[in-house]
Image (cartoon, grey):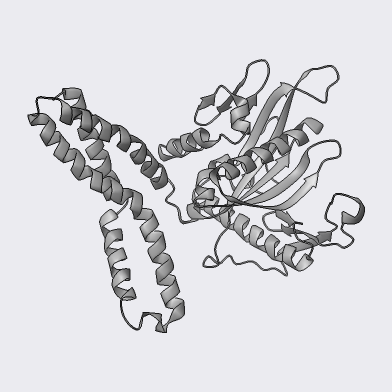
Amino acid sequence: MDSELQVRAQEMVDRIVHLKDSLDYDSKEQRVQEINDLMAAPDFWNDPESAESLVGELKKQNKSIKPLKELVSALGDIEVLLEFAAEDESAESEQELVQVLDRMDGEIEAVELHAMMSNPEDSCNAYVAVQAGEGGTDSSDWAEMLLRMFIRWAEVRGFGLELLERSDAEEAGIRNATVLIKGDNAYGYLRGETGNHRLIRISPFDSAGRRHTSFAAVDITPEIGDDIEIDIDWDQDVREDTYRASGAGGQHVNKTDSAVRMTHLPTNAVVQCQSERSQHKNRASARKMLQAKLYQIEQDKRDAELAARRGQKSKIGFGGETIRNYVLHPDQYVKDARTGHKAGNPQTVLDGGLDPFLEAYLKWQMTQ
């Protein structure tokens, strides 16, 4: 058998074994069996709340180990094919082994990528807030382009979307907007997008056709579940302002102060919601958003990161830290300042083709 093929096969076996151990496959399998045994008991549904909790855990565990179970099953196939290839002089077994290895490469990468999202909040939905920075109308337009990029990314993945708040700029684009992206591991995929994004292009708003640099900030926070409690003194630490939500004009103009803005005074974190006609519903959504933002600030502190990059504290412009550059003139490319990942077609990225950048960030973060 070809020695390079043998080395490749052994490397794949080692990768699968490493994943099996690092993801605690055996104990998860044991837990699935324990829950199945409990569900088989005749009195399982006597305590509906406990039963529903166990059913939810079973679904989560099965979803977690399903792709790994397929890899473990393929592990036996690879070992058998290695034995056959060593004895088979017709090379048919070698060809079959190559086909299996080619197929397993992609599956292993998918499991490895999922393993990078091991924090509890990674599985959550994600709040995506975009805010225009320095650059006038160009930055407002750029902020709307970024918002569209994230919306397109979510749509391609089949994720749910809910526009919570949008404030249009005077001439074009937006001053700020917040959208909730609902899908498996939405926050885990997007968490590296927090920071300043810079656009360099010929401005469509400059009659002289000059090149402009625009900035917009993105903030990603997880939609935390009810099982995570954040201690907030709503009366003393939070200032609530109400205002009229912006609309399409005419009969659609909001006649009441239904939009809600909340400021957490100790941290200066600000959230706002105007997606509902009801002030009560907007207040409930804003509270969830504020809890999520404060939770993320605490996570940042624990990770020894700068919590000041959250809320309204970051400088969105020259002098601020830029995580990614989108260059449309004179060259055309998108480059991440942290990972060095570069794409030569900016339009593909702006149309939602973010996955290579998201995956590069997750892999880069594992090395930090």
* For residue 238, above or below residue 246: below
Q: Quadrant of residue 336?
A: top right
- 296 or 313, which is in the foreground? 296
Picture coordinates of residue 21, whole percent (x, y): 26, 49
From where the camera sits, is residue 135 visible?
A: no
| Residue at horizontal 62 percent and vertical 19 percent from the top | 332
- 80 or 347, which is in the foreground? 80
Q: Residue furthest left?
A: 87
| Residue at horizontal 81 percent and vertical 44 percent from the top | 168
Picture coordinates of residue 224, whole percent (x, y): 56, 60
- 144 or 157, which is in the foreground? 157
Which quadrant holds the N terminus? top left
Picture coordinates of residue 244, whole percent (x, y): 85, 57
Q: Quadrant of residue 137?
A: top right
* For residue 224, above or below residue 359: below
* For residue 209, above or below residue 114: above
| Residue at horizontal 72 percent and vertical 47 percent from the top | 177
Which quadrant holds the C terminus? top left
Q: Is residue 176 left or right of residue 99?
A: right
Q: Is residue 84 left or right of residue 180?
A: left
* For residue 275, above or below residue 158: below
Total labels: the figure holds: 0
- 167 or 340, which is in the foreground? 167
From where the camera sits, is residue 307 visible?
A: yes
Picture coordinates of residue 312, whole percent (x, y): 70, 47
| Residue at horizontal 69 percent and vertical 66 percent from the top | 284
